[in-house]
Image: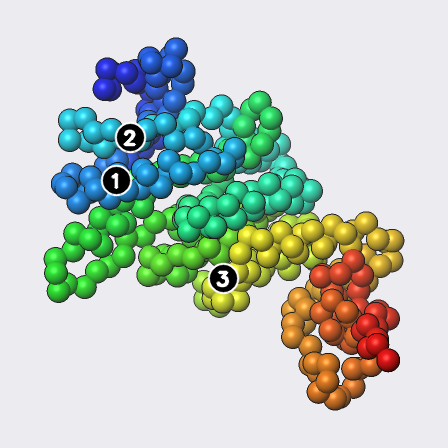
């Protein structure tokens, strides 16, 4: 099959309710491989075309080495198509399945490295006010030539379908938001109301990390009766990583990290802690993981308000020494870290 007298279809590589994806050759670029995504909708009218063009314009502005480049869009036979860069690689789903045949999963070191490589990509998108809304092992691919993780399936079709539903609803009628995202990976607010925020993508990334660490389907690790994740016993991870992932997986958006940059800050601080002597690292890991203390909450007695401990506080988060909580904003636990003295 030849589309637009330019793209020769090799094979269909994916199909779902949102559309169909083809591997093709671009005859005007020396038969360079490319990916063509067909947008499937009940009707293709002026509003759908307008929304599709608008989303294509957004994709055109994305310029990140870990996101497939946007090549163009067109309409043929009443059907809408996107053209994107072809990535030679394997998805995390395929890598996990291959390891499971050998009774193996991803170790903590590889998962941390993955998070450190993907969080900046999400941060880039979120700064552009763009959400992926479908982060999962199927949509993270390890590129063959440099082993760099790529965020794929960032197509306009998902957003266009959601926008079309809202814009085409009869006037005066209530609108049921179109759900975009996979069950088990998308957070509650996205599945229940269709709303999504930057930390909705962080939630899905954390679910992906947990699946790589445990090798288990997310549905088997979520207690639907008590509305909480129960995955710690299924993975061998450090308390600090478990704490970071738990915060990314918080049910309420307000309880999660607000941005990818916040998560990266925690990882950078943790990395600096891990470079300290083993006794210090063990103390930090133990105190961070010990409930009911969260990570560096507001201090109980801010400086100047009186109360015990004001004379000697952690200079990074203001908690007094011996508070029973680890400081991840500094390369040390809460030990003798007096506040800077005021000049005489």
The residue singled out by tag 2 in the image is 73
In the picture provided, is 187 more to the left or to the right than 272?
A: left
Q: Which residue is mark 3?
A: 223
* Residue 205 in view here: no
Q: Where is mark 1, residue-wise?
A: 52
Image-quadrant location for residue 171: bottom left
Q: Quadrant of residue 172?
A: bottom left
Residue at horizontal 72 percent and vertical 55 percent from the top: 269
Residue at 28% in and 42% down: 54
Q: Residue 86: give its label.
A: none
- Which one is closest to the eye, mark 2 or mark 3? 2
Residue 19 at what x, y percent from top left? Answer: 28, 36
Which quadrant would residue 4 be assigned to in this image? top left
Counting from the top left corner in percent of width and height, residue 252 is at: 47, 66
Q: CA distance from mark 3 to mark 1?
A: 38 Å
Q: Nearer the viewer, mark 3 or mark 1?
A: 1
Q: Are marks 3 and 1 in contact (CB under 8 Å)?
A: no
Count neighbours of disc 3 (C-alpha within 10 A) and say few if under 14, some if 14 to 19, many if 20 or more.
Answer: few
Q: Is residue 222 left or right of residue 237?
A: left
Residues at marks 2 and 1 touching, judged by CB atoms closer than 8 Å: yes
Q: Secondary structure at mark 2?
A: strand
Q: Is residue 313 left or right of residue 153?
A: right
Helix, strand or loop at label 1? It is helix
Q: Report the front residue among 224 and 31.
A: 31
State how the image is colored. rainbow
Q: Earlier in the sequence, mark 2 or mark 1?
A: 1
**Looking at the image, can residue 161 be seen?**
yes
Measuring 70% from the left and 81% from the top, which residue is drawn there?
A: 302
């Amino acid at each position: 099959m030849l589309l637009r007298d330019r793209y020769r279809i090799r094979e269909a590589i994916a199909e779902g309710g949102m559309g169909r994806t083809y591997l093709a050759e671009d005859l005007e670029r020396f038969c360079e491989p490319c990916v063509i995504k067909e947008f499937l909708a009940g009707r293709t009218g002026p509003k759908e075309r307008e929304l599709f063009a608008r989303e294509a314009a957004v994709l055109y502005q994305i310029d990140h080495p870990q996101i497939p480049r946007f090549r163009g869009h067109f309409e043929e036979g009443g059907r809408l198509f996107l053209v994107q860069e072809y990535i030679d690689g394997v998805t995390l789903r395929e890598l996990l399945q291959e390891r499971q045949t050998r009774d193996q999963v991803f170790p903590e070191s590889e998962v941390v490295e993955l998070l450190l490589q993907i969080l900046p990509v999400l941060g880039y998108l979120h700064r552009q006010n763009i959400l992926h809304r479908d982060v999962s092992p199927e949509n993270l691919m390890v590129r063959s030539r440099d082993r760099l993780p790529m965020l794929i399936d960032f197509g306009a079709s998902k957003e266009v379908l959601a926008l079309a539903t809202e814009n085409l609803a009869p006037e005066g009628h209530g609108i049921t938001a179109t759900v975009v995202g996979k069950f088990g990976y998308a957070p509650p607010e996205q599945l229940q109301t269709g709303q999504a925020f930057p930390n909705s993508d962080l939630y899905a990334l954390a679910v992906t990390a947990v699946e790589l660490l445990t090798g288990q389907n997310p549905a088997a690790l979520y207690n639907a009766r008590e509305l909480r994740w129960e995955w710690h016993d299924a993975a061998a991870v450090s308390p600090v990583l478990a704490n970071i992932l738990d915060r990314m997986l918080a049910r309420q958006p307000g309880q999660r990290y607000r941005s990818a940059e916040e998560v990266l800050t925690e990882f950078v601080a943790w990395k600096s802690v891990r470079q300290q002597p083993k006794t210090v690292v063990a103390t930090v890991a133990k105190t961070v993981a010990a409930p009911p203390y969260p990570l560096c909450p507001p201090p109980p007695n801010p400086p100047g308000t009186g109360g015990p401990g004001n004379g000697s506080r952690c200079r990074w988060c203001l908690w007094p020494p011996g508070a029973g909580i680890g400081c991840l904003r500094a390369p040390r636990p809460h030990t003798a870290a007096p506040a800077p003295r005021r000049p005489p």
